[in-house]
Amino acid sequence: MTTHVPMLRAASTPADGILEGPRQLRRLPDGVEERPYELFALRPLGRVIGAEIQGVDLAVPLTPALREELNRALLEWKVLFFREQRITPGQQRDFAAHWGELETNPFIPQGDTAEVTRFARGAGMPGLENIWHTDVTFRPNPALGSVLRLITVPPIGGDTMWADMAAAYDNLPVAVQERIEGLRAEHDYLPGFARFTDPELLARHQEQFPPVTHPVVRRHPETGRRTLFVNQAFTTHIVGLPRQESDRLLRYLFTQAHVPECQVRFRWQPDSVAFWDNRATQHYAVNDYHPHARVAERVAIAGDRPV
């Protein structure tokens, strides 16, 4: 018996978009097994990224054992959330310093000290960080991570989202993974800050922050996972490709942060703190709270050169 196959007209969508279908949702590197946490409780907020830590007081200096276990949680979940943390900027800075030297940012207003940057948004200044990005990739050594504390939480909106860029890489077609392996891209501070920063301030730092190149795919220095390392705020072009080809490839790679299965979304409450691995993630501050106020302070930890 012959099976009838209906005749269908030719139709397709562009192949370089995000298509429906199963996703590979791998949270841990190959060879790493699940282990319980002994010094705190952990509640997952997403399948591959994001977990709330319970039972840790950030106002108290960390013991070596607690620091080690929190670092394991950070590597496994990429962003950690802490509720009901009534800490000072100094205590926030001291917590971040357990992970290394702290860095400053001349383009963002500072808080009590140079290591604390302050994001104050209100009726006269709507949020401007609503773009998927990895912090300070315009530096030769981009930040290892950041600790963000909200001081003023809007009554509605103002969430922050994070995307797991190792999961994003895992879900690229094999042909794309092969195409981008070994490529390098240029990163520059100007695209990310020119929209809302005084041109004279930007000009003063051109010699301090010349464009730098990083691998399009970096290996995480602690987990070894391949991670997609381009972002729309600071990545300007792929070295060695014609501009049109570079722009098209970057547009495709930028969209990989937009896949909801690779994301977690955090609803802020007073005294909430987020600590994320900047080497493995991108983030997006949702700008839906204007004209309400949203005030946050961030401490960033200096990182290493991506390879």
Image (cartoon, rainbow, N blue to C red):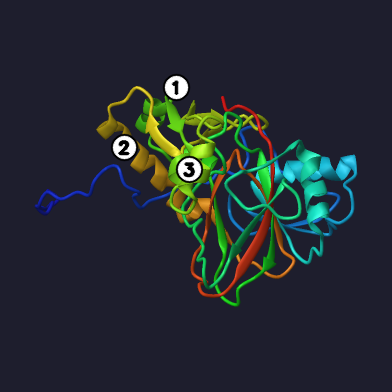
Point out the tag, 1 or 3, that comes first from the N-terminus. Answer: 3
Which mark lies nearer to you, 1 or 3?
1
Judging by the rendered image, the residue that carries numbered circle 3 is 168
From this view, report whether residue 127 is shown above or below residue 105: below
For mark 2, what is the residue?
A: 247
Tell me which residue sits at (56%, 24%) in the image.
307
- Residues under numbered marks 1 and 2 in contact, where contact means CB atoms less than 8 Å apart: no
Secondary structure at badge 1 equals loop
Q: Quadrant of residue 236?
A: top left
Amino acid type assigned to the residue bearing label 1 in the image: Gly
Residue 12 relative to residue 18: left or right:
left
Judge whether residue 100 can be spotted in this image. Answer: yes
Would residue 24 be visible to someone looking at this image?
A: no
Q: Nearer the viewer, mark 3 or mark 2?
A: 2
Place residue 220 in its image quadrant.
top right
Residue 299 spot, x, y in % from top left:
70, 48
**Residue 260 versus residue 115: which sits nearer the camera?**
115
Which residue is pictured at 53% across the width and 44% down the height? 201
Indicate which disc residue 106 carries. Answer: none
The percent coordinates of residue 100 (x first, y second) are: 76, 36
Residue under circle 1? 182
Label 3 SS: helix
Q: Position of residue 163 (x, y in %)?
A: 53, 50
